[in-house]
Each structure stands twice: as C-alpha cells, then as structure tokens.
C-alpha cells in the first residue's frame, strides 16, 4: 500500500524538508503520494509533482487550511488515512505539531525522528541526545512517522506526477490564526544551508555576533546559528538555536565559534560533513567531533579569517 507524505509548504512554495522526507518515504514503499493541505496552494503542488519518486500529488485546498493550523491539517490527514499503511512528515516544527495529533486520532503510537529505514516496519532513531541509536519495530497497522531530514538527501526534480484534488475535512474550529512574525534574511534558511557558522556563549554578547559572525556568514553565503547558551543569554533569537532542543543541521561545512560542545548542541550538528571549531579552551568537548580545530581567541581569529576570505575574493 502507498505511503502518504504530508508536505511542508507556504502555499506558494514547497519546503526543502519535503524533498528529504520523500527519500525516507521511498525507502518504505515505492508508491508515495504527497499531500498538499493549504489554500491557493497550486504552486506548492506543482513543485511537489516535479520531485523524483512522487507517484501522485493530492491537493486539499480550503480556506481553513491556509495557515497550517495543526488541528485542521490533522483532521484532513486522518480523513485520507484509510488508503495508506504509513503516514510520514518531516520532523520540523510543523510536522511535530501535526503528526502527534494524527497518531492520537488514529489511536496508534508514533515513531519519531527516524534517521534510517531498515524495513517498512523497522526504523532507527537517535536517543540520549544522539549518543545512542535505537532500532524500533512498529506493530501498528497504520504507522505514523516523523523524519529527521538532516539524515536524508533531498530527492531531485525530474518527475511529473499527476495532481488530484481531494476534499478537505470540515473545519474543526478549535484554534484560530492570529498572526505571524517572520524573520527575513538574505542568507539561506538554517536547516537547508550548505554552510553554517554558529556562535556560543564565548561570543560575549549579541553585538559581537553582528560584528564578527555576520560578515563571515555573508562572505560564505552561510546561515548563522547559535548554541542554546547564546540563545538563553539573549544574544540572538531562539530561531537560530542549533541543538537537541533547537534545529538539527547537517551542512557540508559547520563552523563552531566559542562553543564548548555540550551534548545538547552536538546532537544538533555532529552529522555535518566537515566540522571546524574555534575555541580558546584546548580541552573543549567540541574538539572531539571537529575535523579541524583552532585553539585561539575568537576575537582575533575571526577578523583574520574575514580578511583572508576577502583576499580570496569572497
């Protein structure tokens, strides 16, 4: 039976997390249907249809689905669940909001944050802040699964799946959309960036993030991140937090500046392809996972790095 993949989108565009979750869905079954639940969401549906491996795109278009309210989306997913053995979504803020409600309505146990598909009913997921990997076999007739997208490569474009309209479930009306405050940046989104440079408590204050981290991020076209300690100290907004309780990233290059390397932070970035650490404490735990380490004062090292990048034409 086919897998139903709940897409993450903004109605006008498809999130990159969907293409990564699609890879996991294809490992479960070859027949993958993607659900676009929203309003005036034809652009997102067209983008989903182009992804390799999608066999059908289902579009539930209704005004009460416009803002992705979890209760509304969950009701529509459950209304379509009868034709599927497995329901999948990215383990993003949106996916973690919707799928537990789907699991509760279906009265099944959810399998969260999988990093590998062993078989259609068996999965691997990290536990103990990523220090151990648990193999879980689900006995449920309908499996509800969230996917840690950092563990899967994105499916490329190249498909041409048919798009089919489906009826959205009636409005639940348990919550209402008040408003959204979106962070605008010319830099790439944190979880999708190929390069991430993060600062920790060693940065001292928020102004130092702007003075030392931002220029390098702009030169490299990198996303900017932070440790929980830096966020808790109020240096930067919490949407920049990388870690077990923040965002999980796996870029091509991760640069950790003034970050000691607490387990909570390592859980969110240790799958990065290349890790560079800059810290004046030679015993900092971050050096245990770093591919390249520089023991230095960051307030001296970062201006020098910025200058060298400028010489290289970046």
Image (cartoon, grey):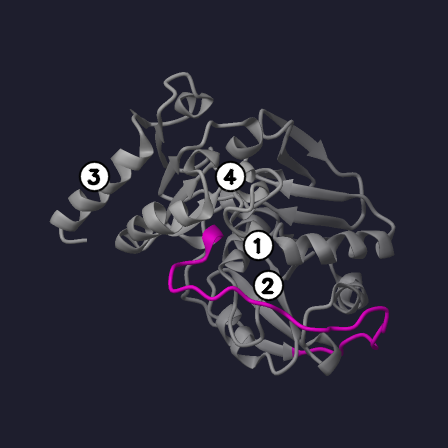
Q: Is residue 33 above or below residue 176?
A: above
* Residue found 60% across the figure and 59% down from its top: 31
User: From the viewer's perspective, is 204 left or right of 294?
Assistant: right
Residue highlighted by disc 2: 8
Residue highlighted by disc 1: 30
Residue highlighted by disc 4: 227
User: From the viewer's perspective, is 275 left or right of 248?
Assistant: left
- The circle on residue 192 is none
Q: Nearer the viewer, mark 4 or mark 1?
A: 4
Mark 2 and mark 1 lie on one chain; the one further toward the N terminus is 2
**Farthest residue toward the top?**
283
Residue nearest the observer in this picture, 223 or 206: 206
- Is label 4 in a helix, a strand or a loop? loop
Residue highlighted by disc 3: 304
* Residue found 73% across the figure and 54% down from its top: 99
What's the CA distance linking mark 4 and mark 2? 26 Å
Around disc 3, counting alpha carbons within 10 Å, would you say few (fewer than 14), some (14 to 19), or many (20 or more)? few
Mark 2 and mark 3 lie on one chain; the one further toward the N terminus is 2
Mark 4 and mark 3 lie on one chain; the one further toward the N terminus is 4
- Is label 1 in a helix, a strand or a loop? loop
Q: Nearer the viewer, mark 4 or mark 3?
A: 3
Q: Nearer the viewer, mark 4 or mark 2?
A: 4
Residue nearest the observer in this picture, 232 or 35: 232
């Amino acid at each position: 039976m086919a897998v139903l993949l709940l897409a993450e989108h903004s109605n006008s565009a498809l999130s990159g997390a969907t293409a990564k979750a699609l890879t996991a869905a294809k490992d479960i079954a070859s027949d993958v249907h993607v659900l676009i639940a929203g309003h005036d969401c034809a652009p997102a549906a067209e983008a989903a249809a182009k992804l390799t491996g999608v066999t059908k795109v289902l579009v539930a278009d209704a005004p009460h689905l416009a803002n992705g309210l979890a209760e509304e989306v969950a009701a529509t997913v459950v209304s379509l669940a009868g034709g599927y053995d497995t329901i999948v979504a990215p383990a993003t803020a949106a996916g973690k909001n919707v799928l537990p409600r789907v699991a509760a309505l279906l009265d099944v146990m959810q399998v969260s944050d999988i990093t590998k598909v062993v078989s259609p009913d068996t999965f691997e997921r990290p536990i103990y802040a990523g220090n151990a990997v648990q193999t879980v076999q689900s006995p449920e007739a309908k499996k509800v699964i969230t996917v840690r997208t950092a563990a899967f490569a994105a499916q490329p474009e190249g498909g041409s799946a048919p798009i089919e309209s489906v009826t959205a479930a009636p409005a639940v009306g348990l919550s209402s959309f008040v408003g959204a405050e979106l962070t605008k940046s010319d830099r790439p989104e944190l979880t999708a960036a190929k390069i991430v440079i993060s600062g920790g408590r060693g940065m001292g204050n928020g102004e130092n993030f702007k003075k030392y981290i931002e220029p390098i991020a702009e030169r490299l076209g990198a996303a900017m991140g932070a440790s929980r300690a830096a966020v808790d100290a109020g240096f930067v907004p919490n949407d920049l937090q990388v870690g077990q309780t923040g965002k999980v990233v796996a870029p091509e290059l991760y640069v950790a500046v003034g970050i000691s390397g607490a387990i909570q932070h390592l859980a969110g970035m240790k799958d990065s392809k290349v890790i560079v650490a800059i810290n004046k404490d030679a015993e900092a735990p971050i050096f245990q996972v770093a591919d390249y380490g520089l023991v230095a004062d960051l307030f001296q090292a970062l201006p020098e790095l910025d200058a060298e990048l400028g010489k290289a034409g970046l």
